[in-house]
Image: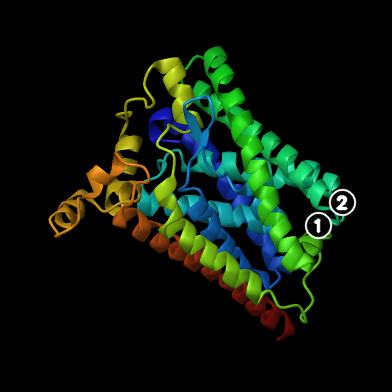
Amino acid sequence: MSDALISPAVGTTFWAGTIAVIGYCSRKLKEKIDDKLIPLMGVMGAFIFAAQMINFTIPGTGSSGHLGGGMILAAMLGSCPAFIVMASVLVVQALFFADGGLVALGCNIWNLGVYPCFIAYPLIYRPLVKDASSAKRIVFASVVGAVIALQLGAFSVVIQTLLSGQSELPFGSFVLAMQPIHLAIGIIEGIITAGVINFVRTARPEIIKNVILQQQLSPNISIKKIIVILGIAALLTGGIFSWFASSHPDGLEWSIKKVFGKPELADKDSSVHSAAKSVQEKTAVMPDYDFKKSDSLSESEQPGNSGADEGKSKWPAVRTGTSIAGIIGSLFVVTVVVAFGFLIRLIRKKQAESRNV
């Protein structure tokens, strides 16, 4: 969601709510973080970052969707680790790739993190999937969980724009566009989610089962194979598969176009929005997952390279900039998440030592 949709007041409110949830999750992780899961948190974040680069076409609509990823993260890691990973992914996207505005970042983390991690997973997915002993049960629970999480997230976007005073997006028309298209996206996301979870369940069922039972993995269980496979999948997804992303507008852009006539609203001119835009222009090393304009021009001048702009009009869009953005972004997310996990572990260790003095 871009900053053009969100007022400073709404953005600040959801920033505050998101920071509070991050604080809650950090405290929970400090109490009982499973050290073996820290690398898995990092590689899952990288996988979700790369997967979100690929928009899949929604047949018959002219729209597309991409993986939210909250249900996969929650099923693989549990609610609090999943929320921290999702927040890290969205922060990296906003700061380094200008994907989503900084004023709207709190809303984006809330919409993609809170609903799947703290509502759909514990209240829908976990009761339905029970002990994760059935692949069919996982498929059903994943689809239902993903659909409900996306419906809540889409409705939340409508409410946030309403509270932001977006008269271009009247509540009735906007909600009637947002909910059905995100129902279709949710069904596809649920199927993809089930595929990933069932793969991990087949290779290392202890991961899925222990998360459901909220238990730590046994020290004798190795998850290196899963981490390596997911790491390779993330690099391939970001580096190569991202070329095959649909060029159709995503569910939000499609809904805005249905109501407003254009897929995007004009930028707001408040001092808060201007400051956020200025910060993002400085931090975004590869805006829109491509080289910056000057770098792009240099690339087009190289022999045999037709340039990034030409690639955008083709499908698949084979672009060096996209591949590098996918790989660098995945590595950024791994670094941020793993550093966060080890920081939490270090704080816990220091506090334990101080209590024993």
Q: Is residue 68 left or right of residue 311?
A: right
- Marks 1 and 2 close (CB-CB < 8 Å): yes
**298 left or right, relative to 166:** left
The residue carrying pointer 2 sits among few (fewer than 14), some (14 to 19) or many (20 or more) residues within 10 Å by Cα, namely some
Q: Quadrant of residue 157?
A: top right
- Asked whether residue 19 is in view, the answer is yes
Q: Is residue 83 above or below residue 27?
A: above
Q: In the rendered view, would you say 248 is above or below 195?
A: above
The numbered dot on residue 173 is: none
- In-front residue for pair 352/75: 75
Q: CA distance from mark 1 to mark 2?
A: 8 Å
Work out whether residue 207 can be spotted.
no
Residue at the far bottom in the pictured view: 357
Going from N to C along the chain, the mark reached first, 1 or 2, is: 2
User: Mark on residue 130?
Assistant: 2
Looking at the image, residue 159 sits to the left or right of residue 34; the answer is: left
- The residue located at (72%, 79%) in the rendering is 355
Q: Nearer the viewer, mark 1 or mark 2?
A: 2
